Image (cartoon, grey):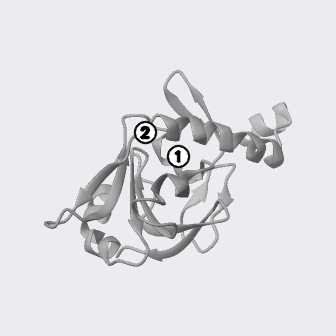
Amino acid sequence: MKYESAWPIVGSETAVLVPARFVDGEVLPLQREEVLRLGVTRKAILDQAPAAAAKVLAGLKPDYVRDKNQVIQYAVLASESPLTASAVLAPGFTELFADTLGPDLLIAIPNRFRILVFPRDTRASQGLSDVVFAEYQSSSYPVSREVFALKKGKLIAIGRYR
């Protein structure tokens, strides 16, 4: 999708961060004329975004997927909120998974409503490439087919499914 106001994600071929407002249950990307009229700055958005993302994250509960030996393979964060994908930008996102998946994570965000979180040192993220691709393709609100890491709170694309 094309947006009037968007910032690139390091390493990404297609995904961008889009400043938006949440009005009456709908995500409304900021339009260029709104940015100019309201005098909204990138700094102001970046200052407010972590707190907003933290509220989204607080409303999500990880569902852990285990193998046949009951070892946790990955986590899924899902909800009906169109803000779900923004939870990856919340302070404390990686800490939420430190005890179960470890401190170094890989993240897939196929659509607005679903986040898959993998430990970096396993092959679990590769085994779900078809699932991520299918969820991306079938969604009315796709986010990305890329795999991300978080470095000092910043999302970085490090690979792509298919």
Residue 140 position by quadrant? top left
Tell me if label 2 and label 1 are in contact, CB under 8 Å. Answer: yes
Q: Is residue 46 above or below residue 9?
A: above
Q: Amino acid at mark 2?
A: Leu
**Along the line of sight, the residue nearer the viewer: 9 or 39:** 9
Dot 2, how many residues are within 10 Å of its Cα: few (below 14), some (14-19), or many (20+)? some
Residue 87: give its label.
1
Residue at which label 2 appears: 60
Q: Give the residue at the far front of this rendering.
A: 99
Q: How many marks?
A: 2
Question: Which structural element holds mark 2?
Answer: loop
Residue 29 position by quadrant? top right
Q: Is residue 106 above or below residue 62?
A: below
Residue 150: where, in percent of width, then height?
Answer: 58, 65
**Along the line of sight, the residue nearer the viewer: 101 or 131:** 101
**Along the line of sight, the residue nearer the viewer: 98 or 137:** 98
Measure the C-alpha gap from mark 2 to mark 1.
Answer: 9 Å
Residue 15: where, in percent of width, then height?
Answer: 54, 62
Q: Amino acid at mark 1?
A: Ala
Dot 1, how many residues are within 10 Å of its Cα: few (below 14), some (14-19), or many (20+)? many
